[in-house]
Amino acid sequence: MLSITDESNLLEFTGFMGYDRHDPFAPEGADPAREFAEVQSRYADFVQAGSEAFTSMFDAPLIYNGGGSRTYHLYTDQLQTPIDEVAMGSAFS
């Protein structure tokens, strides 16, 4: 997708939209904290891969969206993640 955007005059890359699933509702035997950490690590890997392959697209300020209504409270200043915007749509329904 980034290569299509990079070659297009019609599309503009403004960041990533991620989703940390429903980690608080991980199946029995799974560790929700570990699942959340894995999602953050995978997200950071995508950002790193994109920035290495398409350096010029990452020069401008970008939005790194993620999270959700059930996990917003886990996004603290101590969390090491590129995510800088947390979605909370269903919290208001």
Image (spheres, helix red, strand yellow):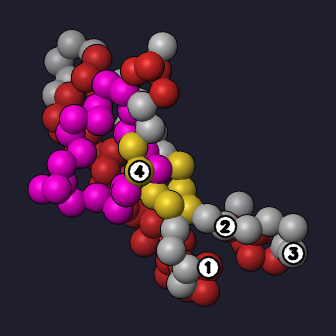
Looking at the rendered structure, the kind of residue marked 3 is Asn
Residue 84 higher or lower than 54, as above or below: above
Residue type, numbered disc 2: Phe
Look at mark 2 in the image and give the residue it sits on: 13
Real-space CA distance between mark 1 and mark 2, rounded to the nearest whole angstrom: 7 Å
| Kind of residue at badge 4 | Glu
Give yes or no for contact between labels 1 and 2 (Cβ–Cβ under 8 Å). Answer: yes
Instruction: State the SS at label 4.
Output: strand
Residue 59's place in the image compared with 8, above or below, is: below
Spatial separation of the CA atoms under disc 3 and disc 4: 26 Å
For label 4, count other residues whose C-alpha is less than 10 Å away and answer few (under 14), some (14-19) or many (20+).
some
Secondary structure, mark 3, is: loop
Residue marked by disc 3: 9
Span of residues in magenta: 65-84
Q: Nearer the viewer, mark 4 or mark 1?
A: 4
The residue carrying pointer 3 sits among few (fewer than 14), some (14 to 19) or many (20 or more) residues within 10 Å by Cα, namely few
Q: Where is 28 relative to 85, above or below?
A: above
Q: Are marks 4 and 2 in contact (CB under 8 Å)?
A: no
Q: Is residue 68 visible?
A: yes
The image quarter containing residue 30 is top left
How crowded is the residue under tag 1: few (<14 C-alpha within 10 Å), some, or many (20+)?
some
